Image (tube, grey):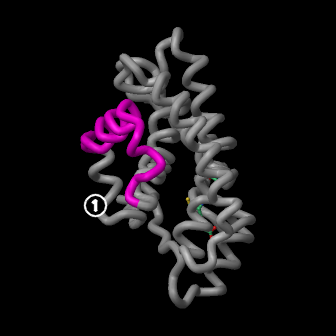
Amino acid sequence: MGIMNNMKTVEMFPQDPDKEKVESYKRDVHPHGTIPALVLEDGRTIIESGAICLYLADRYGRLLPEKQWTAEYYNWIMYASITLDEMMEHLFTQWMLKGPEQEDKDIAQKMADKFKVFAEYFNNFLKGKAFICGDKFTAADCVMGYNIWWASVMREGCLINDWPEIIRYRDGLKSRDAFKQAFTTQPLQAQYQ
Ligand SMILES: N[C@@H](CCC(=O)N[C@@H](CS)C(=O)NCC(=O)O)C(=O)O
């Protein structure tokens, strides 16, 4: 279990960034300087969160789907990493980083509209399921769950408040011990242990 015992905490958006540390992180680990990144024992790096989850599930044989749920497993991991992540990044930039005075309202509205199409679809998908792959919590819930939590802490949860299945899914994830260990109750302040 070596790599999981070597978790490093990274401060997001520090007031006074240590330039040398940032440059060495960019040079040695992640060229964009973003998180997360997984450095393997032999020095190879995985620099995309969805790929990290897929790799860890596969390597440790945990959080994998039952065979009949493989399509949903890959579909939602890829959808969250590519399509949903783009919406979330724009919304986070406009709503949280720029704020009401400076936000580009056209971009924010376009992304909120696109999110609504996703929310209706995902809300229907979740009916009758505890998790993405039925009753079993898998790596797909780690990837999608992060985005759903992220959506729920922006602008009083306006992106998800109208979707009861998504709220139920989010609450189910939040009630898990592992979620409680990974997050404080402070929105957008993740603590990694
Ligand atoms: N698609 C990437 C996104 C990585 C990313 O943007 N990470 C954010 C945190 S969730 C970050 O490091 N932001 C800080 C920055 O952009 O400087 C992934 O999922 O791994």
Which amino acid is tagged 1?
A: Thr
Q: Is mark 1 within 8 Å of ligand 1?
A: no
Q: In percent of the image, x 61 and y 26: which residue is there?
A: 74
Apparent side of residue 159 relative to residue 42 in the rendered image (left or right): left
Find residue 33 and report its horizontal and vertical position in percent: 67, 68
Secondary structure of the residue carrying tag 1 is: loop
Residue furthest bottom as drawn: 16
Which residue corresponds to mark 1? 185
- Residue 129 occupies quadrant: top left
Placement of the C terminus among the 4 image quadrants? bottom left
- For the point 30% across and 36% down, the residue is 172
The residue under the point 56% across, 62% down is 92
The N terminus - image quarter: top left
**Whether residue 11 is situated above or below residue 159 in the rendered picture:** below
Q: Is residue 170 left or right of residue 34?
A: left
**Mark 1 nearby-residue class (10 Å; few <14, some 14–19, many ≥20):** few
Q: Is residue 40 magenta?
A: no
- Which secondary structure dominates the residues rendered in magenta? helix
Could you tell me residue 17's position as x and y percent? 57, 86
Task: Decide if residue 3 is on the left or right side of residue 191.
Answer: right
Numbered range of the magenta stretch: 156-177
Residue beneath the point at 64% across and 78% down: 22
Q: Nearer the viewer, residue 169 or 124?
A: 124
Residue 168 x/y as whole percent:
32, 34
Q: Residue 106: tell me if it is visible.
A: yes
Residue 44, image x, y percentages: 69, 51
Q: In the image, ligand 1 is in what quadrant?
A: bottom right
